[in-house]
């Protein structure tokens, strides 16, 4: 693995750091999408925000990129129920078009493939 992060690796790291920070900047929006039965929404949002920040920072560093990538993959699997909940209960999210809620669902596996490839390849996809 190279000593430097590629553009793709930097993009992934910064996307997750930014998303994690956003969990603390506008927590109400994230609390609303925590499906019932997943525990205290404030705690879930805080934990997922910390996980995104840690995973994003880890992805920027060559020594921790692979384990951080695996952590981000696990995180995306863990948050998928929230995306599904939003799509199945679109009436609770009237500001977002129903089509957009459903369109997000197949994007998650694509994001996972992007992370997997960038975490394991010396030259990340799209660089």
Image (tube, rainbow, N blue to C red):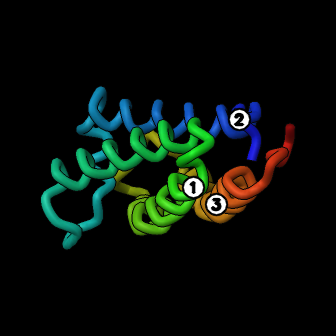
Answer yes or no: is residue 118 visible: yes
| Quarter of the image with the C terminus in it | top right
Image position, residue 26 (x, y; %): 29, 31
Q: Are marks 3 and 1 in contact (CB under 8 Å)?
A: no
Q: Number of callouts in the render?
A: 3
Q: Which element is circle 1 on?
A: helix
Q: Earlier in the sequence, mark 2 or mark 1?
A: 2
Q: Earlier in the sequence, mark 3 or mark 1?
A: 1
Residue under the image location 42 percent in, 61 percent down: 79
Q: Earlier in the sequence, mark 3 or mark 2?
A: 2
Of labels 3 and 1, the one closer to you: 1
Q: CA distance from mark 2 to mark 1?
A: 16 Å
Residue under the image location 36 percent in, 49 percent down: 51
Q: Quadrant of residue 123?
A: top right
The image's mark for residue 112 is 3
Image position, residue 111 (x, y; %): 66, 55
Q: Which element is circle 2 on?
A: loop
- Seen in the image, is 92 located left or right of residue 69? left
Q: Are marks 3 and 2 in contact (CB under 8 Å)?
A: no
Residue ranking furthest to the top = 25
Q: CA distance from mark 3 to mark 2?
A: 23 Å
Circle 1 residue:
69
- Seen in the image, is 117 located left or right of residue 97? right
């Amino acid at each position: 693995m190279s000593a430097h992060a590629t553009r793709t690796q930097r993009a992934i790291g910064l996307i997750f750091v930014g998303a994690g920070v956003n969990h603390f900047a506008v927590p109400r929006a994230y609390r609303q999408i925590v499906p019932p039965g997943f525990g205290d929404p404030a705690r879930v949002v805080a934990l997922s925000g910390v996980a995104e920040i840690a995973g994003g920072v880890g992805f920027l560093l060559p020594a921790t990129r692979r384990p951080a990538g695996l952590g981000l993959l696990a995180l995306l699997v863990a948050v998928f129920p929230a995306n599904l909940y939003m799509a199945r209960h679109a009436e609770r999210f009237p500001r977002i078009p129903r089509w957009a809620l459903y369109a997000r669902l197949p994007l998650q596996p694509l994001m996972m493939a992007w992370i997997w490839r960038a975490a394991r390849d010396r030259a990340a996809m799209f660089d």
